Amino acid sequence: MMAPSGIGMTSETTRRRLIKRLRDKGIQDERVLDAMAAVPRHLFVDEALSSRAYEDTALPIGRGQTISQPYVVAMMTAAVLREGRLGKVLEVGTGSGYQAAILSRLADKVFTTERIGELQRSARQRFHRLGLHNIYTRHADGNEGWPSQAPFDAIMVTAGGDIPEQLFEQLAEGGVLVAPETAGTHQQLVRVTRRQDGYEREVLGAVTFVPLRTGLE
C-alpha cells in the first residue's frame, strides 16, 4: 500500500524520534516501544493529518473521536502487560484501530468493540491491509464487553466515565483492566487487577479521554 504523500521517506525517521521521546518520558518496557516502532501511526489518521502522525499528541479522527496521544497509548499498554505474552485482550473503543494494532503485537488475540459503525469498518479495513489477522472487531456497545469471548487476560477501555460492572465480571483471575474513570471534575487512569479474593486498584495518573457512551451509531 502506498504511503500518504510526503510520508514514505520520513515515517521511519520520525517514528524513531517518537520512540526516543517516549523513552525520555519514562516508558521503559522495550516490548511496548518495539510495538510502537513497528506500527505505522500515519496509516491510522486522515491523510491531511499524516504529517503530524508522529507528534506526541492526540489527533481527531472524525465523529467527535480522537486517536490517543502516543505517550498515553504506551502507558496504557505497559499497564496491561505481564511478564509473558498476553493471551486474550478486550479493547472497548476501537476508534482508529491504532491501540488495537499495538496490542496485536503483544497478545495472541485482540477483541475490540466500537459503537460507531463507520469507525469500526474503517479500522477493520486497516487491520486487513496491514495483515493483522489476530484482531477481531465488533460493532457493539462496549459497555457490555464481549461476553462470549470472556474471560480476558486484559481489558482496556479507551473512553472515560464510570467503568461498567460487566467488564469486571469478564476479567480472568489475575487479569488486569486499565481504564480512564471520572473522578470529580477530571479523569484518572486506573489499573484494576482481579484477585481470588477481590480486586486490587491503583491510580496511574490524570488523563483526558472522550466520554464513554452507550448505544450504537
Image: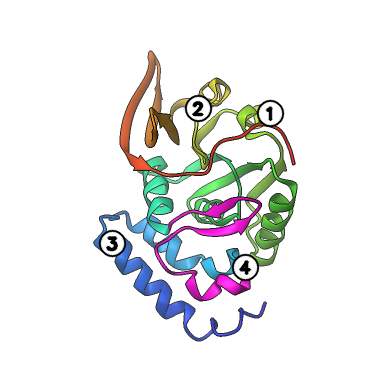
Residue wearing tag 4? 46
| Quarter the N terminus occupies | bottom right
Total marks drawn? 4
> Distance of mark 4 from mark 3, alpha carbons?
26 Å
> Distance of mark 1 from mark 3, alpha carbons?
37 Å
> Distance of mark 4 from mark 1, alpha carbons?
33 Å
Left or right of 21: which side holds 120? right
Q: Earlier in the sequence, mark 1 or mark 3?
A: 3
Q: Residue 74: horizontal and vertical position, in percent?
A: 39, 53
Q: Secondary structure at mark 4?
A: loop
Boundaries of the magenta span? 47-69
Q: Earlier in the sequence, mark 1 or mark 2?
A: 1
State which quadrant residue 180 falls in: top left
Residue wearing tag 2? 163
> Distance of mark 1 from mark 2, alpha carbons?
19 Å
Residue wearing tag 1? 148
| Quarter the C terminus occupies | top right
Left or right of 131: which side holds 102? left
The answer to whether marks 2 and 4 mark residues whose Cβ atoms lie closer than 8 Å is: no
Q: Residue 183: horizontal and vertical position, in percent?
A: 38, 29
Which amino acid, by three-letter code, is at mark 2?
Ile
Q: Secondary structure at mark 2?
A: loop
Which amino acid, by three-letter code, is at mark 4?
Asp
Which amino acid, by three-letter code, is at mark 1?
Ser
Q: Residue at x 26, y 58 (%)?
A: 25
Residue wearing tag 3? 23
Q: Which mark is residue 208?
A: none
> Distance of mark 2 from mark 4, alpha carbons?
30 Å
Q: Secondary structure at mark 3?
A: helix
